Every structure is written in structure tokens, then in C-alpha cells.
């Protein structure tokens, strides 16, 4: 594998040459914005036959995607992974929504799920939600990265709570957001979500508005799901199914996420 003179890298994860070529414009765009290198990873059995046709350093791994993804930040200084998402992909393919989420379940880096029919990356409008629950600081840091390096407009959606306790906790989260953004001289726009249940998933409601080019979502610990949750598809899967042409940047809820060193 050729090495670039970069300290941190973006992982382009692909099972096929077609996927690698589809994802490359996204990887290049973010590589230039964040000033990171690109490494192409594949666990495909025939990866050796086609990786050389993609103009970037590459690694062909003989093993499971989940193991490769978990090792990426330690072994290769990866801070962001990019993968295609295609509901029509074979069930065991990385691009299949269920398999993608399963393989990235233990990821210590952010991962961008790119719709299979997307051809280029637009980051003019980046959206995320805040609610009454404890928020990951990495979620707000990634929003700040998009504002700083991609010059994205940041749009923060929230449920207009009537419950005083929920509203107070939401306000605490906004105070933290204000602290992060003001320290970097960044701006964001705040938007209340249309009416509905205060217990509804704000991500699904915000994405359904169709007003963003990229969406940032925090993946909750699966251990927090109760019996009723188990009867429904997990929120990340529902988000992918409703995302249509919108790329979704996922962050797992864990204390050891790797972030950019800028």
C-alpha cells in the first residue's frame, strides 16, 4: 500500500469497483475540505483484481467488514468512513442498509452512508436535531467541522416541548451548542419541528422535511432499546429507508469516538 503524507485518513469502503468509483467524488470532496488522505478498503474476495484501477492508496483485507472497521482508526488513523447504501444490494453486501449498520455498529469513527444513486456531494445545508436527551459532544463537533471546512449552513431542528422538564433539558443542550459554536465564531439556524408527539423521533421528523443536503444522526446504544422498541426497526434503519437521496452521517453513541485533530 502506498502511503500519503497525511496524519489522518478518510476510509472509502467498497465491495466492488463500481461502488468505489461512485464513492470517490464524495471522498475527494471531503478529503480536500478536511485536508485528509484517502484509503480505499475492501473485504471483497476479488478485491485484488480491481483495487488498482482506483487512483488512491488501498488495502485488501481478508476477513469480516466489522473487524476491519473496528481496527481502522487504530491501525490506519481513519477518522471518517464512507460507504454506499443501497436497499437493492444483496443481503450480505456492505451496501445493504441492515448489513451496513450491522458492520458499523462498533465503529469508533463517523461513517457516511451515501445513497447508491448519488453522484456528487452537496453540503450547503447540513441538518441535525437536538432533543431532551443527553447529546453527544461529537455530534456537535461534526456539525462544527461541516461549518468550518465545508462552509455548510447548519440547521438545528427540535421538538417544541410543552413538558417543562423536557424543555429545560433541551435548553441545556442548546446552551452547550452555543458554547461550541461561539468559541469558533460559527453560526447556526434553529428550527422548531411541526406539531406531533413529544416522544417521536426528531431525526425522522426533521429528515422528512426534505430541507437538507446532509443529515447528522447519533446512533443510540442498542442496549437502551426496550421491548416496544424491539417490535420496530431500529431508528437508524428507519432513517436510512426514509433518507432517499440524502447522505446520512452517523455517529455511534460511545465514549471513545475518534475525532479530527484540527
Image (cartoon, grey):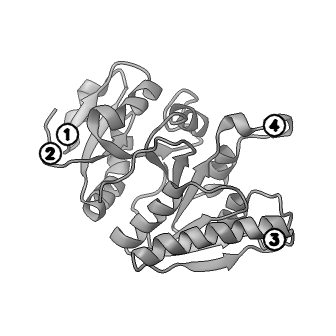
| Residue 99 in the image: above or below residue 173 | above
Whole-angstrom CA distance, mark 2 to mark 3, is 49 Å
Tell which of 169 and 162 is nearer to you: 169
Circle nearer the viewer, 2 or 3: 3
> What is the crowding at mark 3: few (fewer than 14 residues within 10 Å), some, or many (at least 20)?
some
> What is the crowding at mark 1: few (fewer than 14 residues within 10 Å), some, or many (at least 20)?
some
> SS of the residue at dot 4?
loop
- Where, quadrant-wise, is the N terminus in this rendering? top left
Where is mark 3, residue-wise? Answer: 161
> SS of the residue at dot 3?
loop
> What is the crowding at mark 2: few (fewer than 14 residues within 10 Å), some, or many (at least 20)?
some
Circle nearer the viewer, 1 or 4: 4
Circle nearer the viewer, 2 or 4: 4
Looking at marks 3 and 1 on the same chain, the residue that comes earlier in the sequence is marked by: 1
Residue at point 71%, 41% (across, down): 234
Whole-angstrom CA distance, mark 3 to mark 4, is 23 Å
Looking at marks 1 and 4 on the same chain, the residue that comes earlier in the sequence is marked by: 1
Residue at point 45%, 44% (across, down): 257
Amino acid at each position: 500500500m502506498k502511503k500519503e503524507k497525511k496524519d489522518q485518513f478518510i476510509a472509502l469502503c467498497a465491495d466492488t469497483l463500481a461502488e468505489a468509483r461512485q464513492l470517490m467524488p464524495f471522498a475527494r470532496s471531503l478529503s480536500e475540505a478536511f485536508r485528509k488522505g484517502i484509503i480505499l478498503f475492501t473485504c471483497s474476495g476479488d478485491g485484488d483484481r480491481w483495487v488498482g484501477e482506483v487512483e488512491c492508496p488501498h488495502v485488501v483485507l481478508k476477513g469480516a467488514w466489522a473487524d476491519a472497521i473496528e481496527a481502522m482508526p487504530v491501525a490506519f488513523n481513519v477518522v471518517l468512513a464512507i460507504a454506499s447504501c443501497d436497499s437493492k444490494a444483496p443481503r450480505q453486501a456492505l451496501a445493504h442498509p441492515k448489513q451496513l449498520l450491522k458492520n458499523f455498529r462498533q465503529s469508533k469513527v463517523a461513517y457516511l452512508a451515501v445513497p447508491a444513486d448519488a453522484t456528487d456531494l452537496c453540503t450547503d445545508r447540513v441538518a441535525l436535531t437536538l432533543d431532551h436527551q443527553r447529546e453527544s459532544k461529537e455530534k456537535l463537533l461534526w456539525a462544527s467541522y461541516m461549518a468550518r471546512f465545508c462552509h455548510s449552513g447548519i440547521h438545528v431542528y427540535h421538538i417544541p416541548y410543552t413538558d417543562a422538564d423536557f424543555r429545560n433539558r433541551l435548553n441545556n443542550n442548546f446552551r452547550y451548542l452555543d458554547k461550541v459554536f461561539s468559541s469558533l465564531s460559527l453560526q447556526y439556524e434553529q428550527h422548531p419541528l411541526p406539531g406531533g408527539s413529544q416522544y417521536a423521533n426528531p431525526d425522522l421528523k426533521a429528515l422528512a422535511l426534505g430541507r437538507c443536503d446532509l443529515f447528522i444522526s447519533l446512533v443510540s446504544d442498542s442496549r437502551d432499546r426496550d421491548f416496544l422498541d424491539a417490535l420496530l426497526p431500529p431508528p437508524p434503519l428507519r432513517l436510512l429507508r426514509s433518507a432517499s437521496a440524502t447522505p446520512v452521517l452517523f455517529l455511534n453513541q460511545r465514549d471513545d469516538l475518534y475525532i479530527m485533530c484540527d
